[in-house]
């Protein structure tokens, strides 16, 4: 499914977020940046898609290099082309891989990011444990994700309506794929709240988990630290 929309993925993200997804990623990068003694280590971007998160990480002097990992093979050439165009090919590389079975040794990365990908994991607890495993002790992960509203947020009444009716229409109009963008609101409705995801991060061994809200609380950035 993600492969079929790869060519229009960036455009749709920009349209649906009003262009704000770039700022959300930059905020997440600021929150996840490694501190002493792990400066100049490698970073990992999981569910990297077309590579925006990975390339934002690669710009930071605290990061020596970035690996972007995704199972959607058609996304990867787009990410590599972006890296070459921005002359970041030496600092950012992109590989096919599964978040539930990361092909890296323990304690490899100083930080990690996941942008709008956790919601699509088959086994979220397992994937979170894998992320914690490959982080160095004290290394951080930032998860940027659309979460189910808990009812306390006034936007909770409006957001599902927008998502359910407008998102599939945009997907059909721009990407020619209504099915993929019907899945998107359905996946959010079936996903968990920010507090539930925070609990799973704690259960996976991540500590000091914080939650920052953007987009009127419909999207959150959760940051946790490896033990």
Image: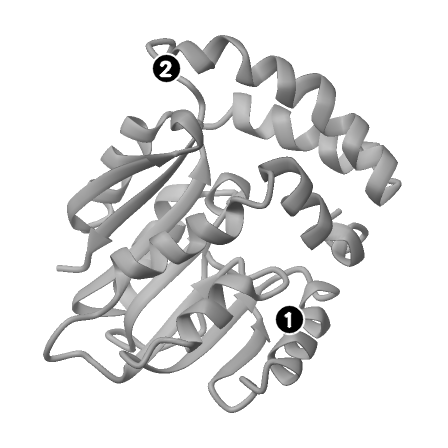
Where does the image place residue 202, in percent across and percent down from the top left?
19, 42
Mark positioned earlier in the residue sequence (2 or 1): 1
**Badges 2 and 1: C-beta atoms under 8 Å apart?**
no
| Residue 89 as seen in the image, left or right of residue 91 | right
Report the front residue among 165 and 139.
165
Report the front residue among 42 and 103.
42
Q: Quadrant of residue 86?
A: bottom right
Q: For residue 192, say whether it is visible.
A: no
Q: Which mark is residue 71?
A: none
Report the front residue among 121 and 148.
148
- The residue that mark 1 highlights is 79
Image quarter where the C terminus lies is bottom left
Where does the image place residue 179, in percent across and percent down from the top left?
80, 33
Q: Residues within 10 Å of mark 1 (few under 14, many from 20)?
A: many
Report the front residue among 163 and 206.
163
Q: What residue lies at 45% left-to-right and 65% top-to-bottom?
A: 45
Q: Quadrant of residue 132?
A: bottom left
Q: What residue lies at 29% left-to-right and 60% top-to-bottom?
A: 30
| Residue 114 as seen in the image, left or right of residue 210 | right
Where does the image place residue 18, in percent across and percent down from the top left?
60, 39
Q: What residue lies at 50% left-to-right and 8% top-to-bottom?
A: 157
| Residue 64 as seen in the image, left or right of residue 3 | left
Residue extending furthest toward the bottom? 90
Position of residue 101 relative to residue 120, above or below, is below
- The residue that mark 2 highlights is 150
| Residue 205 as seen in the image, left or right of residue 145 | left
Q: Label 2, label 1: how many angstroms apart (C-alpha)? A: 34 Å
Q: For residue 155, say whether it is visible.
A: yes
Label 1: element kind: helix
Q: Quadrant of residue 130?
A: bottom left
């Amino acid at each position: 499914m993600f492969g079929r929309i790869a060519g229009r993925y960036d455009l749709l993200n920009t349209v649906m977020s009003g262009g704000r997804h770039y700022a959300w990623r930059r905020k997440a990068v600021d929150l996840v940046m490694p501190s002493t003694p792990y400066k100049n280590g490698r970073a990992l971007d999981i569910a990297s898609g077309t590579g925006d998160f990975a390339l934002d990480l690669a710009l930071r002097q605290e990061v020596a290099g970035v690996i972007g990992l995704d199972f959607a093979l058609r996304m990867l050439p787009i990410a590599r082309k972006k890296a070459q165009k921005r002359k970041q090919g030496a600092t950012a590389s992109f590989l096919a891989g599964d978040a539930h079975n990361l092909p890296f040794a323990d304690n490899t990365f100083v930080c990690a990011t996941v942008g709008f990908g956790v919601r699509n994991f088959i086994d979220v607890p397992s994937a979170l444990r894998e992320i914690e495993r490959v982080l160095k002790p004290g290394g951080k992960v930032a998860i940027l994700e659309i979460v189910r509203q808990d009812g306390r947020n006034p936007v909770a009444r409006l957001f599902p309506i927008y998502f359910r009716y407008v998102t599939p229409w945009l997907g059909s109009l721009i990407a020619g794929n209504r099915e993929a963008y019907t899945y998107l609101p359905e996946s959010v409705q079936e996903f968990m709240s920010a507090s539930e995801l925070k609990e799973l991060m704690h259960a996976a061994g991540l500590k000091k988990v914080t939650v920052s809200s953007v987009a009127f609380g419909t999207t959150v950035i959760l940051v946790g630290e490896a033990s």
